Amino acid sequence: MPSAMPAPLYTASPRPVTASGVPAPPFTNRPQAAPAPRVDPTNPYAAVGPVAAPARPQQIRIEVGSEEIQAAARGGRKKVAVLAFITAIIGGVVGFAVGGGAERAKGADAAVEGAQQLVKDVQAANAEVQKLADTLKAAKEKLGKGQFPEQEVSALGAINIPFSGAKLAGKGIGRFQPEVISMLIEYTNATTEANDQKEKVQNVLTGAKKGILELLDANVMVRWAVQVQDGPNGPWAQMSMVPAPFSAKEKWVDEIKLGPADKQTTLKRYTSGGPSGSFIPVDPGTQTSVCPSDVVFKLRRELNDLETVLRGDNTPGDEKTGIIDSGNKLMDKLKKIGSTG
């Protein structure tokens, strides 16, 4: 996305034209240039300090790097990036209002206050991110134990990361350095996407509750059996899915039929004697840990992926910065800006 620049608030007067119709040299009657502001490169908010007022109104430009905006727009996040960019422009135009030193100082003070408020906003958002990560972890662990995460699903409905592009409005972020603006945009994108993904996971768990409970019921349905056969060096067992699951609490079936209809093999349930050629039901309580269903496995993976987005990943060679760490780094930058007031 190309960098959008605001239209100049003031345009320079046209050059005088000589009798021959050729524009006069640019140094003819040229007004004295305003002294350049002193910028501290180590300060994340270099433009806060008031600068000397120019002799006449100058054209104003908001310095927002196109690379940061393009990076924020990748991955289907254009809507939030554009909102943040427009907010930056509005804040910058207000912050760089043309006038005397008092007006410039007033705009700088407003931006400092904006940074201080953003620190509180990010801190509140990070607290919800932490709560969401803990809830996802608990839900994932319960599914791994064959339990439906009833309390966690209910808790997900009450969790919402309170940070969006609206938080950037009126904070004068146009006065911040491009690095800080980029961090704000990235954090806004990340929290917005995390909220959306959280809702999807919650809807899946809620809508598929009945089916998930049937899959996780460790005390009712026998879904797997082992078939004992002669192996190369003695009897061994083969895992087989029971074609018609039966209740573990009621009378067990005496036989099951495996294979296609035209080549079915009938196996008797083992009761005594040699086990070869018979089947043995598998304890339902061990099914989810040894042979998890695809549905439960995918749900656990979705919960784990979202938790990684929130917490990050410290695995060597696959390090990823999570929203929590990004928020902490952003707060450090904003606190430096706020402390200049």
Image (tube, rainbow, N blue to C red):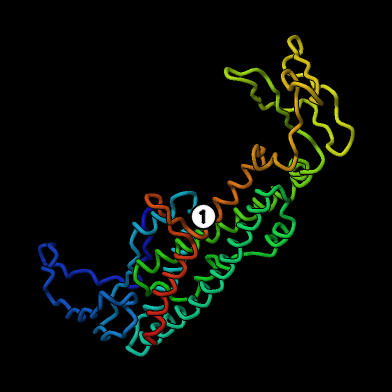
Left or right: 102 with respect to 254? left
Q: Position of residue 196 (x, y in %)?
A: 60, 55
* Relative depth, front residue between 309 and 52: 309
* Relative depth, front residue between 184 and 89: 184
Where does the C terminus fall, quadrant-wise? bottom left
Q: Give above or below for 228 relative to 153.
A: above
Q: Position of residue 231 (x, y in %)?
A: 61, 18
* Relative depth, front residue between 101 and 27: 101
| Snapshot quadrant of residue 24 | bottom left
- Can the viewer see residue 86? no
- Can the viewer see residue 102? yes
Q: Position of residue 136 (x, y in %)?
A: 62, 57
Write down the residue under mark 1: 308
Q: Residue at x 25, y 72 (%)?
A: 13
The three-letter code of the residue at mark 1 reads: Thr
Q: Residue at x 38, y 79 (%)?
A: 337
Q: Residue at x 60, y 57 (%)?
A: 137
Left or right: 144 with respect to 7? right
